[in-house]
Amino acid sequence: MSDEIDSTAASDAASPDASAAAKPVSRRAALKVLGTVPVAGALIGTAAFAQQGTPTQQSPQLPKQTHETTSPPAEGTGKNPPKNQQKPAFFTAAELRTVGVLADDIIPRDGRSGSATDAGVPAFIDFQMSVPETSDDLRVAMRGGLAWLNTESRTRFKKNYASLTADQRHQILDDIAWPDKVKPGFSQGTAFFSRFRDFVGAGFFSSAMGWKDLQYQGNVFNPNWQGCPPEAMQKLGVSFALMDSRIPPDQPTG
Amino acid sequence: MLARRQAPYDVCIVGSGAGGGMAAYALTRAGARVVMLEAGPAWYASKNSQMLTPAYATPRRGRATHTRPFGEFDACDGGWEIDGEPYTRAGNTRFDWWRGRMLGGRTNHWGRISLRFGPEDFRGKTRDGLGDDWPIGYQDLAPFYDQVDDLIGVFGSKEGIHNEPDGKFLPPPKPRCYELLVKKASDNLKITCIPARLSILTQPKPGRQACHYCGQCNRGCQVKANFSSPDVLIAPALETGRLTLLTNSMAREVTIGPDGLATGVQYIDKETGEDRHVAAKIVVLAASAFESARLLLNSKSSMFPQGLANSSGVVGKYITDTTGSDVSGFIPSMIDHIPHNEDGVGGMHLYMPWWLDNKKLDFPRGYHIEVGGGLYPPGYGFMGGIQRFPGRGGYGAKLKEDYRRYYGATIGFSGRGEQIPNDKCYTEIDPNVVDKFGIPVLRFHWEWTDNELNQVKHMQETFRALIHEMGGTPFSAMPTKEQGYGIAAGGRIIHELGGVRMGNDPKSSALNRNCQAHDVKNLFVADGGPFVTQANKNPTWTILALSWRTADYIAQQRKAGAL
């Protein structure tokens, strides 16, 4: 693998040191890194790849793309609808507002990345609720769960969930966010919250923002596979030498 | 459009998967004029794959659809339920029947696990009295396995294990981090663990690039670094100029002449709705095991009232699937992973072949163990159920941090074992139901026996022991016997075999040792239908080798004027 490959921005992203993870990531910086991740086609023609190849092989051809975007859609473009512009397919406007507040309670903005709403999670959940693969039972559970939440909010604080203070909302969430510590009367709310939390986690971390937050480095053209990196092997107490030994099978040999 | 009247083709092949593609490749090279019927549309990974599409390119984020049960980017059009193509189940049968409806069938989305059957796998009855022996042995297939290895390519390591024959291997890729943990735990538990054997190129072949380790083999490979029938077998066959490919063509019946020989195949042209006939001097069925059985059973005549080539009555019988069961668990030492690209190939880099002596166990035959886990590409379903991790749950900044820290801290094991054919597992034509084309459908009967349940119990115990050995905790409780020890329903592993089994005795088999119908000498079967038994190994590599052997036999017979 030539050194020039290792010097691309994508490879920089491949081995960040621990301190990089804690630095705040500006949106512009995040998009810059994402834009140079070599999803198919992004690096065609660069000098680095022109020098690739073994004597028996032509320069590796980067795969052609079949999907439309050449880089992850920036917020406001591409297939993920911008958060304030798309008519919801499933939720009412009031429900969507509740979903947004609850989603941000689950995954808030922090030093590394934005909140659930920053990553388009409400639109993601709305879309998933609207597709035929989602059962009617799940739709009822989602709608009903939000209704349950508002009922609980009004019971405690005389206002719907989206109108409560953060402290009030957290008091309710403390009672439904821990399935192994459920007080009587909160089992249904807990079941709803566990499912809703799954949607928020999936919607956030499967977004472009989420991939960056997790430092997921795959989904790229990576011809120089070297297995588990040395620092990871050291951390886990393993090494490639494990592959040198064999336990023979306890089998008749014919 | 009317078909022009033309001379019969030399060979008609029904189905374009591993067996059909291999037969087309070999027969066109031997000079035969071949026509191939494929029920679905054309599809080539090199053109149509959604490789390297990130999850966030769509709002579905990779979620499964009705026609893509393994995910929207997966290279599969088909599934266990296809609109307009039902099947039925008798009584309390739990059986799900997978159909691919695309050029190349399952070879587009399969796991590329490419294991030769071993010498013992052809002689199970001799060994333990169960099932039946094959009419051929490993030595009959060895030269064809070699050819398949050379043509298609498989990575692996020479291990010298008697019943896991070594192939002509490309170098295997280095293990992932969690795979090294698995090796360590396997060593401690005295479980054999070796590099995997997958049909993925770690070195290039003519016209096919080496793997670039994006881990998305299931989407089909745009650079042909893995095996799927359209790019590796059908395209070269088309290049000979001797293959006519008819896609969107649903075979309905094999036709015969007054002499009882096959004359061709009647099919429905799905684009026009017309019923058409293609004439051929030789017919090869490779529509997938149970579709081929269905075709024979639906090809009734006064000469063959039980269905074509079924004077033995065994067509539809002796059917099996691989046994399957999974356990996944949380491995604390994998928390706070060091970020890196862990994609690798689209499958495990190491695995555990069957390692025990059944004489010391309460079940016959064995299983191999497949390994997965680590840093899956985040998509729909990402880290569902975080509350399953000990002490996890909640919301807010701490939860967000927990997702980051616990991402990748899971390992999963899947067992894939050998079912013995039993007389409660068979398929027949449903007396009442037809599909949207008017073709009578299959009705399935299925029951596992204690052979399989005890085997799967052993899988569960082994996987839990491995997870425990790695310091981890399983996500699920040990299934009870009432829960079948977690055994997957029949058909869910998608390794159906049998239904048109081969044998030396025409009273108890449909095909001879050359996969030629005893009753109809110009009729052959080249998919998983001829298999006499399962093995503790996936069938595709054996389907390829057996199909090549069958095609060579056809070519020799043609040359000798016998066909």
Image (cartoon, grey):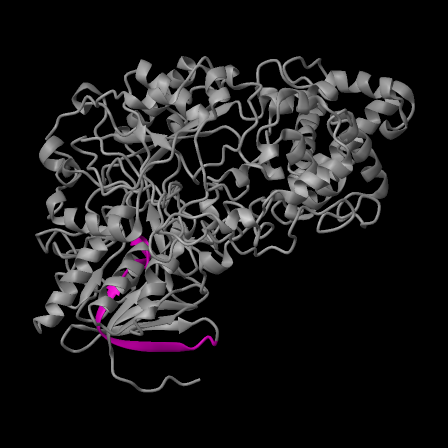
User: Closest to the observer: A8 or B52?
Assistant: A8
Residue B439 placement, left or right of A166? left
Residue A74 placement, left or right of B212? right
Residue B326 lies, in percent from the top left, at: 41, 29
The answer to whether B445 is drawn above or below residue B356 in the figure is below
Q: Quadrant of residue B457?
A: top left
Q: Quadrant of residue B464?
A: top left
Q: Is residue A39 visible?
A: yes
Residue B435 placement, left or right of B134? right
User: Closest to the observer: B170 or A85?
Assistant: B170
User: Closest to the observer: B222 or A106?
Assistant: B222
Residue B273 on the magenta segment: yes
Is the N terminus of chain B in the top left, top right, bottom left or bottom right quadrant? bottom left
* Residue range highlighted in magenta: B272-292
Residue A38 lies, in percent from the top left, at: 58, 45
User: Closest to the observer: B398 or B124?
Assistant: B398
The answer to whether A110 is drawn above or below residue A144 in the figure is above
Residue B488 on the magenta segment: no
Q: Quadrant of residue B484?
A: top left
Residue B178 lies, in percent from the top left, at: 45, 24
Number of numbered discs overlaid on the protein picture: 0
Is the C terminus of chain B in the top left, top right, bottom left or bottom right quadrant? bottom left
Q: Is residue B497 visible?
A: no
Residue B247 lies, in percent from the top left, at: 41, 68
Residue at 12% from the left image edge and 51% from the top image edge: B503
